[in-house]
Amino acid sequence: MAASAVNKVVLAYSGGLDTSVIVPWLKNNYGCEVVCFCADLGQEEELDGLEAKAIASGASKLYVRDLREEFLTDFVFPTLRAGAVYEREYLLGTSFARPLIAKHMVEIAEIENADAVAHGCTGKGNDQVRFEVSTMALNPKLKTIAPWREWDIRSREDALAYAEEFNVPVSHTEKDIYSRDRNIFHLSHEGGLLENPWNEPEGSMYQLTKAPEDAPDRAEYIEIEFEEGNPKRLNGEELNAVQLFTRLNAIGGEHAIGRTDIAENRLVGMKSRGVYEAPAGTIIHRAHQLLESICLDKQTMQYKDTLAPKYAELVYNGMWYSKLREALDAFVEVTQRTVTGTVRLKLYKGNIMVAGRKSPYSLYREDYASFGEEDVYNQQDAHGFIQLFGLPVKVEAMLQLEGGGTTSYRHPDYSKFKRD
């Protein structure tokens, strides 16, 4: 891309070494103005002094937006309501943050009349796809610059040298053994000892959760109330999304809830190992499942479970702004109309155990399920049902016998089925 093709760029900025170095690199290689944008998603990083640092690095200005509530209500909750889990375990904590950041980058680019956006994602990961596909969907006219796919910087030492050459303020020079991503939903860990899947994660790596052996010896009971699939109250107290997640992260972390160790398939084709801490997300995901178990009928629940992996795949692959995900959301919306009620959970040393669930829309009726009155369920009706339900296997067994075979399913002789 020619330098003259870009006049102003909006950069997704964290204040870390990579994005700090990107500011002068963009100016030096594209001759453009750089506007920085930092999304506050609850990453707990120090935002004080970030504007001064961005300006000192060469940016013309810095936007900081608190997106925690929007992140939870518009991205996290829909994913949890869908029951979406990537490859059986990953609750998508990083994945659904990227389209939100991209959304605001595009908005700022339009405010600033910028003609490009930039990010600090490497060329090996999923995030580059999530940022760029989201940008394409929201404003296909914007160009995207990915320095890691262009520059000659290949190591932290190279980046530090570049920062020193162009007087970029760097807070520290020590390299963390792990690559981390944090928001109010989760904390991920990659690299270091985790690159060998045989290595057990070291205890000092974890930051949000206690180890099970260090968790309290006494269980804690909590109650979560849902309205149409969204968590609204904790122990009877109505909370906004940020308050709810903040409290559940603290409670879950204390009881060693939410640790996951995954070898996942990246979109770009390689496997990677990540360890995730998501106390609140894990608790709400489980509570929502339990409430659905009494509020959804059999066919709806089974079909919803078949769509959940596709929803997870779309989110993981950066296709949040796609027609299919929007269509799946419409389906989920209908299923959640009666998912209202309360779930009581028992938390103990990394375990989430159900202690009770209730709903005004519960399809579970004790009077129907018991062996008492037969006003609704007549046990004599079961005979005809069983005869019809078992008809296919009965016919198959009869064919076996007529052919001189056996009805044993240990070694069925299907050659006896053949007719002249």
Image: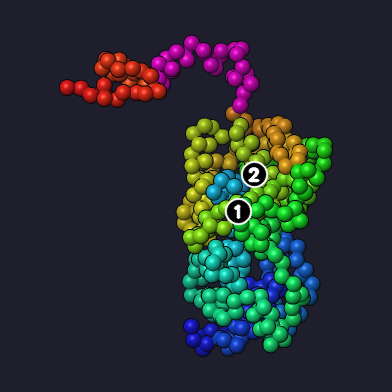
* Residue 74 visible in the displayed image: no
Residue that mark 2 sits on = 285
**Contact, mark 1 vs mark 2 (Cβ under 8 Å):** no
Query: Residue at the spot x=66%, y=32% of the render?
Result: 360
Q: Quadrant of residue 390?
A: top left
Quarter residue 351 falls in: top right
Say if 216 sits above or below 21 in the image: above
Element type at mark 2? helix
Residue 186 position, x and y percent, is 68, 55
| Identity of the residue drawn at 54% across and 32% down | 297
User: Looking at the picture, does residue 56 appear above or below residue 73?
Assistant: below
Residue 240 marker = none
Residue labelled with disc 1: 197
Query: Please, which residue is most extreme toward the left here?
Result: 420
Structural crowding at the residue carrying mark 2, measured as other residues with C-alpha within 10 Å and reported as few (<14), some (14–19) or many (≥20):
some
Name the colouring of the figure.
Answer: rainbow
**Tag count:** 2
- Give x and y (percent) for residue 325: 50, 53
Q: Which of pointers 1 and 2 lies earlier in the amino acid sequence? A: 1
Q: Residue at x 49, y 62 (%)?
A: 268
In this picture, residue 45 sits left or right of residue 3: right
- Compared across the picture, whether 187 is left or right of 28 comes to right
**Magenta includes 406?**
no
Q: Which residues are magenta?
A: 364-390
Residue 385 magenta: yes
